Image: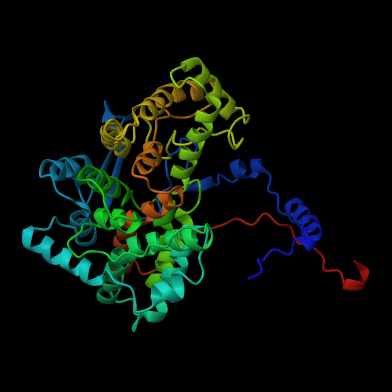
């Protein structure tokens, strides 16, 4: 198969691109003049209110003497503090992803019978149509797993006997099915890439009905299907922490926007996947991991804090790694003091690092986490504090689990599909209008000139 490239006409494209750039540039001062909220955020970073949700709550401020002041971040799923949810699940020494999916979708914590019934439903739906793996996933392998998943999701539309019905009952059925098969779409897509594009052995295992979602992922991914209980429990925790984060994050807002148009579930989830793929959103954990790999190549002594600080400064000066001027994994659009998901995940990552022999890597991450805010504060004019976010340690976690980098963002999607589903159902159940924000046109009227006189 010939690649879609057409490099022979690239010079012409380059000329046209320059023309497009020149004719599409907007003066940044106009955004201030017309008080446009770039990124739907005020200058202080506060998001513009665009909707209501009962699915999750993000707290980054507290009221002190009548004034809002920054505080350690808190995240609530349906009113329950995520920290309490994770602690409760860990104290019972069990897997909790499926329980939290139930909470997000239905708004209440399940009792034992409800949870067992829901788990059985997930297992029942954890299967793909006959020959789907062969005809869809294996026949068109992609080096980009997010695009592979999106293609699979859109193709599943064709296998649904009632794909366009947007009634709550039908959409709930579709969402539960997608939640169930996302681990399969992700891991099988990777195996197709690894076999056909890397010439490695092909493994297509079946999911065991007794396994949790985290166990399914590890058993499908590994050739020998083996994993430790600690590995599966830590992955389960990571999935819980990634599955929902308010209605304002880019991919969830995308879900609301696309759902409001009345489109089908498969199209809405594919749109959310396209959003999450971006390096400014779900792809950030990959950039963190790649940044640290570059750092380890350029710093001989990982305990030399002066060398680490110098590297971080070169990152901000666009002289190191990808030269984008960013320290990936630092800062968040909402949290100022701390990201609650990061606080929970860090302890689990440290525990796994000690067991798996990654203590030196963990200490390097910890030093960067400590030094980066101070260096960013010196180099940048920032309107709020800078702290590490959930992406900072998740890449290290996945590498310790021997999960390939290509699957980092798909694992994020495998968790976040639960949140997207809850928000799609909420939008359908409450909203009656298509979401259509206003854009101000700054173009001026022009006189039409006939072709022969241009």
Q: Residue 444 placed where, x, y %?
A: 74, 57
Q: Residue 440 placed where, x, y %?
A: 60, 55
Q: What is the basis of the colouring in this image? A: rainbow
Q: Residue 351 placed where, x, y %?
A: 25, 33
**Is the N terminus in the top left, top right, bottom left or bottom right quadrant?**
bottom right
Image quadrant where residue 371 sits? top left
Specify whether residue 424 is in view.
no
Total marks placed: 0
Task: Please state which of residues 346 and 38 is positioned toward the viewer in this rendering.
Answer: 346
The residue sitting at the bottom extreme is: 161
Q: Residue at x 59, y 46 (%)?
A: 34
Specify whether residue 403 is in view.
yes
Left or right: residue 258 compared with residue 307: left
> As displayed, is residue 44 above or below residue 284?
above
Task: Please state which of residues 454 and 88 is positioned toward the viewer in this rendering.
Answer: 88
Task: Please state which of residues 267 and 34 is positioned toward the viewer in this rendering.
Answer: 267
The residue sitting at the right extreme is: 453
Q: Residue at x 47, y 44 (%)?
A: 286
């Amino acid at each position: 198969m010939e690649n879609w490239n057409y490099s022979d006409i690239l010079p012409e494209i380059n000329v046209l691109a320059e023309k497009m750039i020149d004719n599409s540039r907007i003066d940044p001062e106009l955004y201030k003049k017309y008080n446009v909220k770039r990124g739907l955020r005020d200058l202080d970073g506060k998001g513009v209110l665009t909707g209501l949700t009962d699915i999750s709550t993000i707290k980054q401020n507290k009221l002190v003497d009548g004034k809002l002041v920054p505080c350690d971040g808190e995240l609530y799923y349906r009113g329950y503090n995520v920290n309490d949810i994770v602690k409760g699940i860990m104290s019972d020494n069990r897997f909790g992803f499926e329980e939290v999916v139930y909470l997000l979708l239905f708004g209440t914590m399940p009792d034992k019978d409800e949870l067992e019934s829901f788990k059985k439903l997930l297992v029942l739906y954890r299967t793909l149509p006959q020959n789907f793996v062969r005809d869809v996933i294996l026949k068109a392998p992609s080096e980009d797993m997010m695009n592979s998943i999106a293609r699979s999701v859109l193709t599943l539309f064709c296998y649904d006997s009632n794909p366009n019905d947007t009634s709550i009952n039908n959409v709930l059925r579709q969402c539960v099915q997608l939640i169930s098969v996302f681990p399969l779409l992700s891991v099988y897509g990777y195996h197709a890439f690894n076999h056909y594009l890397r010439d490695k052995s092909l493994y297509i295992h079946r999911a065991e009905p007794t396994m949790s979602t985290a166990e399914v992922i590890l058993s499908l991914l590994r050739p020998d299907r083996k994993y430790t209980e600690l590995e599966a429990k830590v992955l389960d925790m990571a999935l819980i922490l990634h599955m929902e984060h308010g209605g304002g994050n880019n991919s969830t807002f995308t879900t609301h926007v696309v759902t409001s148009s009345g489109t089908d579930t498969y199209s809405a989830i594919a749109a959310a996947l396209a959003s999450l793929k971006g390096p400014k959103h779900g792809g950030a954990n990959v950039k963190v991991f790649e940044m640290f790999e570059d750092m380890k190549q350029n710093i001989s002594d990982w305990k030399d804090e002066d060398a680490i600080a110098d590297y971080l400064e070169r990152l901000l000066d666009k002289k190191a790694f990808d030269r984008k001027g960013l320290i990936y994994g630092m800062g968040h659009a909402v949290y100022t003091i701390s990201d609650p998901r990061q606080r929970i995940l860090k302890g689990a990552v440290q525990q796994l690092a000690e067991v798996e022999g990654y203590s030196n890597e963990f200490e390097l991450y910890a030093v960067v986490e400590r030094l980066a805010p101070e260096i960013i504060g010196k180099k940048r004019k920032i309107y709020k504090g800078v702290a590490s976010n959930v992406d900072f340690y998740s890449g290290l976690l996945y590498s310790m689990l021997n999960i390939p980098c290509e699957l980092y963002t798909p694992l994020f999607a495998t968790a976040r599909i639960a949140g997207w589903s809850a928000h799609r159902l909420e939008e359908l159940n409450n909203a009656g209008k298509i979401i259509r924000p206003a854009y101000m046109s700054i173009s001026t009227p022009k006189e039409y000139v006939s072709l022969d006189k241009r």
